[in-house]
Image (spheres, rainbow, N blue to C red):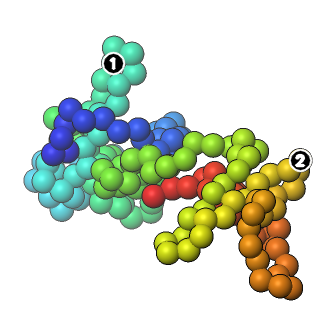
Amino acid sequence: PEKPDQKFAADQASVDRLLDALSTLEPGAFVTGRKDKHTDLEIDDEKGVKATVTAGSKTLAVVFGRFAKGGGNYIRKAGDDDVFVGKGTLANNLKKDFKAWRNKKLVSLKQDEIAKVTVKPAGKAAYTLEKTGDAWALGAGATVPEGFVVDKTLIERVVRNFAGLRA
């Protein structure tokens, strides 16, 4: 928000959940048409969560309030006093902090695309994990203590975790 011109990739899973929630939003009962009730329902301009949905040339601005008895949230069209109950999880998805929408994925690789991982622990010698065929092993030149047994499952887990590395 403090840098409106700066753009960041959104977390696709969060966007998908939001769009699913938008498509399953169901209108509920009419609650009130009195503007003086907006503060109590937390659907006023101060406490309400405002959202604007654009589809083609159409735009709809709505305000979500607090959780309603029986499920859903109070909802009203921006600029309108009429309040309804909106059934679904859309309001909960919208209440995320700005930073929660940001894609935090650091690496965009598929596990089967990785052929080699080099690890350099601070103050220690580097070593390599290499894939030969379908198997992962310590790379050539790695020194291991006598009697040391390589845990291939652990090596595969390191590679799998690296492929999906997130901040």
What is the count of numbered marks? 2
Residue drawn at point x = 33 percent, y = 14 percent: 57
Check disc 2 and report the residue beneath it: 133
Which quarter of the figure is the C terminus placed in? Answer: bottom left
Q: Is residue 24 above or below residue 131?
A: above
Check disc 1 and report the residue beneath it: 58
Looking at numbered disc 1 in the image, what kind of residue is underneath it?
Lys
Q: In which quarter of the image is residue 92?
A: bottom left
Residue 83 appears in view: no
Q: Please tell me whether mark 2 sits on a helix, a strand or a loop.
A: loop
Report crowding for label 2: few under 14, some 14 to 19, many 20 or more residues within 10 A (C-alpha): few
Give the mark nearest the N terminus, 2 or 1. 1
**Of residues 166 and 10, the one drawn nearer to the viewer in this rendering:** 166
**Of residues 152 and 49, the one drawn nearer to the viewer in this rendering:** 152
- State left or right for residue 11 relative to residue 125: left
**Of residues 88 and 137, the one drawn nearer to the viewer in this rendering:** 137
Measured as percent of width and height from the top left, residue 66 is found at: 30, 60
Real-space Cα separation, disc 2 to disc 1, in angstroms:
54 Å
Measured as percent of width and height from the top left, residue 91 is found at: 38, 51
